Image (cartoon, grey):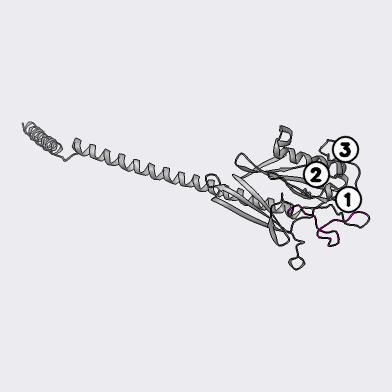
Amino acid sequence: MHQTQGQTRRRAVHRSQSALTSQAACGAPGFTLVEVLVALALMAVLALLSWRGLDSMLRTRDITGARIHTVALAQVSLLQWQADLNAVQALPLLMNDTALSWDGRVMRLLRRSGTPLVPEDRLNQTQTPNDAAQPAVASADAGMQVVAWTVRDGHWWRWQSPDLRLRGDVLKAWQQAAQWGQNPNDDLRRFEARLMPVQSWQVFYFRENAWVNPLSSAGNSAAPATANHGLLENKAGAANPLATPLPDAVQIQLTLDGKYAPDSGKLTLDWVNPAYNPSRS
């Protein structure tokens, strides 16, 4: 009898606790549908702003990288042009001792080769532009190179011949450089390189204390033989009276469009002949 009454009391207490727990659960605070929708909208806005910021950072990185590449290419192009002029050297009694030529479109230079010197036992393994075996030579001189510069298709282009040691090869490469500047074929294009973006360019020579057009009579004038003004002498020791010496300085003016080039407007660069003596002019 006592056990039955105890069990009845425990069951009543259990039912009372269950009822209280159910009432507490039903009365707990929660989120309404409007609150959930507002939270989702805010999260969407934050995600959109974050994506725009990330996209802006990526675009800035790409623009900065392209700018750095363009500026570096321009620096390399200008340094290469100066290096070619610094290495200019005429050959006696060849092409009237001409080492620099400008026809209004193409600048051609005859320069010392920039190829590193090779051991003497490997010299005969090299080939001429005509794929003929090199004759035996007694030095490790890499020879000469013909270089040409021109503007085509909105870029500055450079053409370079292989190393040359025979006068006949030099003459042929000199003619090929002129052909490359006017109407290049696939074979000549193998030796070209596209450099910085340029729309057009002009060239001026400094002679007799004045900037002159290279195509004018003053620009192509030969120096008097008695002055030995930059002339190379022939085997007999006499200067070639028909030789056209290097100018005292060369100036180029490159027209840039600003779209692909680092800047817009004109870029002027001067090269001064190391043999130029202002007091002698």
In the rendered view, does 80 fall on the left or right side of 94?
Answer: left
Which of the labelled discs sits on residue 178, or is there none?
none
Amino acid type, mark 3: Ala
Amino acid type, mark 1: Ser
Which of the labelled discs sits on residue 139, or is there none?
1
* SS assignment at label 1: loop
The magenta span reads 219-235
Q: Exactly how many numbered labels are in the figure?
A: 3
When the figure is inspected, residue 68 is found, relative to residue 279, above or below; the finding is above
Circle nearer the N terminus (2, 3): 3
Real-space CA distance between mark 1 and mark 2, rounded to the nearest whole angstrom: 14 Å
Which of the labelled discs sits on residue 133, or is there none?
3
Amino acid type, mark 2: Asp
Real-space CA distance between mark 1 and mark 3, rounded to the nearest whole angstrom: 16 Å
Residue 105 image offset from top left, x and y in percent: 68, 44
How packed is label 3: few (under 14 Cα within 10 Å), some, or many (20 or more)? few
Residue 43 image offset from top left, x and y in percent: 30, 41
In magenta segment, residue 11: no
Which of the labelled discs sits on residue 163, or is there none?
2
When the figure is inspected, residue 62 is found, relative to residue 10, above or below; the finding is below
* SS assignment at label 3: loop
Question: Which residue is nearer to you in this view: 73 or 42?
Answer: 73
* SS assignment at label 2: loop
Circle nearer the N terminus (1, 2): 1
Q: Main secondary structure of the magenta part?
A: loop
Residue under the image location 81 percent in, 60 percent down:
229
